[in-house]
Image (spheres, rainbow, N blue to C red):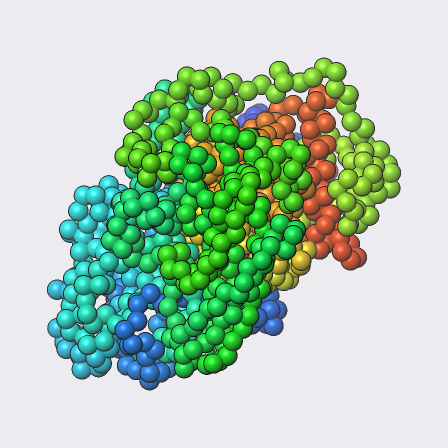
Amino acid sequence: MQDVYDYTMQALPYLIPFFAVLAATIVLWIAMRKKSRAVKRLVRGESVLACILTLALGANLICLNPLSNVMSLVFAVPAELSAETKAESEALIEEISGEGIVLLENDGLLPLAQNTRLNVFGWASTNPCYGGTGSGAVDTSTAVTLLDGLENAGFELNTELSDFYVSYRSDRPRIARVEQDWTLPEPMMSEYPQELLDSARDFSDTALIVITRVGGEGADLPTDVTAVTYEGNPGDFTEGQTILELSKTEREMVDYVTSTYENVVVVYNSANAFELGWVEEYDNIGGVVTIAGPGQTGFNALGSVLNGTVNPSGRLVDTWVYDLTSINNFNNIGDFRYTNMEEFGTEGNPIVSFVHNVEGIYVGYKFYETADEEGFLDYDAAVQYPFGYGLSYTQFTQEMGAMTADGDGNLIFDVTVTNTGDQAGKDVVEVYYTPPYYNGGIEKASVNLIDFAKTDLLEPGESQTISFSIALEDMASYDSYGHGCYVLEHGDYTVSIRSDSHTVLAQQTYTLDEDIVYGEDNPRSTDQAAAQDLFQWIEGDVTYLSRADGFANYEEATAGPSSYEMPEEYKAVYVNNSNYDPFAENDPSDVAPVMGEDNGLTMKDMYGLDYDDPLWEDMLDQLTVEDMRYMISSGGYQGGAISHIGKVYTVDVDGPAGLSSFFNGNSGTAFPCATLIACTWNKDLAYERGSQIGQEARELGVNGWYGPAMNIHRSAFSGRNFEYYSEDGMLTGYMAAAETKGAQDKGVYCYIKHFALNDLEQNRENQICVWSTEQAARELYLKGFEMAVKEGGATAVMSALNYIGTQWTGSCSALLNDLLRGEWGFQGVVVTDSFAQAQNYKSADRAIRNGGDMMLSSAVGGAQELEDYTSATSLNYMRTACHNILYTFANGYEYSGEVAVRMEPWKMGMIVIDVVLAAALAAGEILLLKGYKKNRGSL
């Protein structure tokens, strides 16, 4: 509605002439009452024609100005995927899902015989989770359902039971950005007809229980269900219970099924880790599998895994604990609002909020493994399924060859995997390192994933040898309080292969005699400039968890916030639109750039050129102020055509789980969510998925993809976890880099997002200030982006809605200039996250002056416009932004071959309508004049 209001306000000025003519028409009609019939008809007719003409002119101007981008998006000609591409996508989805399903428990019950008769319990079996909601949602109206997948695998289902669930409720409660209903519509056991239960017992002695949880953009999953909208059965949850545990009704259903059926399998369907300790209470739960949102055809893979056609090889990408409320950051997720920042809010939204990432680097398995080593907790009592855990229907051995240093800073070794079981299957080699830790020194987790590989399908008795090369510099830690850069401290570095983060299969040690400091004169080999302190200021006044003395400060660090006031020293440097004036930042000595030259260059000439090629200066000299203003301020979901430089109209779309336009319904295939892709631990599949997204984009006329998304699962309760890969930055980075490279190899640029530290949804548009250590930021939250840039070759980035410290990420120079472009060597465009709403912390001027380039808005003339487009200072920043924008666009597939600068279809339609209307007005004018002459002559 805010968008509708904004567009209306922008359109009204163009209708002023119409309203003036309409008013004049009303006056004339009244004034003509006593005039002759001929004059009356002529004047009134002319006034009507004038109204129509001015209305048509106003409508044309509105369509060509404030609504031009929206018109282009809404009235785009629909495109369809070729049958071949659609089939390839669906086959890939099944393959990803088959490798991403994780087998958590199996007492020999699985796999089931293909003709097994199944009673499928749980309302969610008829309304499962295919992905998530919001910009990452995809069209699943024709998707293979969970029950379809089971039937397609040869299982015979009790349809009476599923019909009962459909009649109970056919739709899933709405979880959207603006409203959330967290109701779990599970029927109570008293509501099951007795004859249905009797019939089910006669049908089969095997039952499948389906439990599902769904998340989405704009809302985190509730940590206290009694505090949110929930209209389920009375007593489902008591105060303090989270949505990620069984409801009372679900527990009663589990009790009934396990007491009635000899063979029970549990399927958990979600991207959010769940409390599954209850499965250990039931002896006849013989198997447990988890499958995150599988997209269009992924539920076929569920059937194939359950019947053994596919041997499960997925591994968890998060640590699954018995009690999610015991996690070290639980007290620091949720709704925290400053009480002394009202002057930075707006009349309608005075909120400035915050979140403290108090756990530092100790997120997920990095905490639990380190705490176990320190003797801080009982690991087995805390962790049910470790990070990287997953079972198979066969057995494997892994043998680690001798590890040697190659003289170039790498540790080299082989791992030989052998299938020692009796079924074909795939295994995952997980490589971790344990660095030396010195009490009170640089924070280090005792276990850190550094690489991994998935084997081919190995037949029984077959072996495969995989080679690894681990760069020593990749084991360096960021030293925030000493050298202010990455440091590889002296001591023993243990490299291990593990079946999960906790279970060591083999290990070897490399001893470093002295520290290696990756300072200004010795940058890491992948850095364009040496890493140095950039984010000390985002630590704030927060106590962070430390390993020192065996996590001695745990209670203090992990407690909830003790103050809800931003400290004055940080408030003094807090910036939003209320205290920012771009004109005050101008340098009077700046010289305006050359503009409007005719150098004869087109975008086709720029294809493949280096960012620093001198020809770019000639191209940029051709731009006008209006060209630059338009590209910067109207970069949401499309890039307008600029004919005099041969820039074609381009389209960008959501989302991470598949191409999807909410403007015109034009969408691609629904792929599995990022979490399921990461559960494959298969880099090649991630690349193939990115490549297939690129192929679909080309067929749909899409140029840029708002994805992949690579924030981390800081909390199991993040509503957007389905869009993100893992709790681990390294696993995230490998998968994100592979997907990014796959799409970019097809000429589709990827807006990797949300840059950065946007790992919760609560208060995301309420100026949420994220506080973290620089070490945690670099080693966890930024790692995926770093790898997607350096290894994936990303040429587009989407900044985030949140602040880091006191600066909005969309205008944080340390983030966008110093780190992204300077240290990592990124070249390309940075677009903001949604600029649709007129919030008082987003500023186009502040963005382009601090490393941002393009505002994600489809409007023209709204809040996303620059205030200053006349000063030399601003014009130079605009030129730099447009260089970044055009560089990314010029290297897209549109310019790799013949380039056709085409007119958007709605503009051609408008011309046709205008011609017809002009002819009609001319005919009307002729008829009026003839009628006047005739009527006048008859007087």
Along the line of sight, the residue nearer the viewer: 179 or 708:
708
Q: Residue 152 falls in which quadrant of the image?
A: bottom left
Along the line of sight, the residue nearer the viewer: 286 or 932:
286
Of the 4 image quadrants, the one containing the N terminus is top left
The residue depicted at 22 percent of the width and 47 percent of the height is: 241
Of the 4 image quadrants, the one containing the C terminus is top right
User: Residue placed farthest to the bottom in the image?
Assistant: 115
Along the line of sight, the residue nearer the viewer: 744 or 868:
744
Left or right: residue 512 versus residue 207 is right
Q: Give above or below for 812 relative to 791.
A: above
Left or right: residue 340 versus residue 442 is left
- Residue 392, given in percent of the width and then of the height, sits at 39, 71
The residue depicted at 73 percent of the width and 22 percent of the height is: 872
Q: How many marks?
A: 0
User: Residue placed farthest to the right in the image?
Assistant: 599
The residue depicted at 47 percent of the width and 17 percent of the height is: 572
Left or right: residue 837 versus residue 633 is left
The residue depicted at 34 percent of the width and 78 percent of the height is: 111
- Residue 684, given in percent of the width and then of the height, sits at 57, 64
Q: Give above or below for 308 relative to 779.
A: below
Residue 572 can be seen, yes or no: yes
Residue 327 can be seen, yes or no: no
- Residue 217, given in percent of the width and then of the height, sits at 42, 46
- Residue 685, given in percent of the width and then of the height, sits at 54, 64
